[in-house]
Image (cartoon, helix red, strand yellow):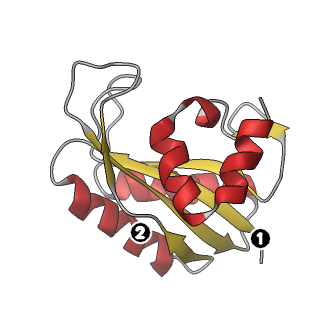
Amino acid sequence: MPRAWLSLGANIGDPPAQLAEAISRLDAHDHIRVAAQSSVIRTKAWGKTDQPDFANMAAEVETDLPPIDLLHACLDIERDMGRVRHEVWGPRLIDVDLIAYERVVMESAKLTLPHRFAHERDFVLAPLREISPETADWLLRRL
């Protein structure tokens, strides 16, 4: 089954609990199995810095969903958990980003793989290195 790597983050509410809930919801999905998850790290906000620190982690999933459908499943989980998008890079209850899907390289109006900023963000790379160092290295080589 294809593998994909996700970056999860939260900085309002109870971030560790929300990350755990997002992982549970991913694993409960009929077409997604969480194969690995990193520890949770605390990081300063990126982009818009006048907000609380983030709790971040990574997950490796196995899925029979194509990339765009996996993205929609992640967005559905965010919505179902109460995420409302007010501002770019602003505070969030939960964020589930599709970082890489196998070694697929694609760009569409809805999805770019690998994630266009993953290689610039230590809060993505550090947890990813913990569960899949080869994927983190691949992202860095894509520069």
Camera-side residue: 123 or 24?
Answer: 123
- Quarter of the picture holding the C terminus: top right
Question: Residue 125 at what x, y percent from top left?
Answer: 55, 45
**Helix, strand or loop at disc 1?**
loop
**Helix, strand or loop at disc 2?**
helix
- Mark 1 crowd level (few <14, some 14–19, many ≥20, 10 Å Cα): few
Question: Residue 70 at what x, y percent from top left?
Answer: 64, 59
Give the residue drawn at x 53%, y 73%. Answer: 36
130 lies above or below 51: below
50 lies above or below 19: above
Give the residue drawn at x 48%, y 54%. Answer: 127
In the picture of the structure, the residue carrying the numbered disc 2 is 23
Residue 139 is drawn in which quadrant? top right
Q: Tag on residue 2?
A: 1
Residue 122 visible in this rendered orientation of the protein: yes
**Does residue 75 appear to the left or right of 120 in the view shown?**
left
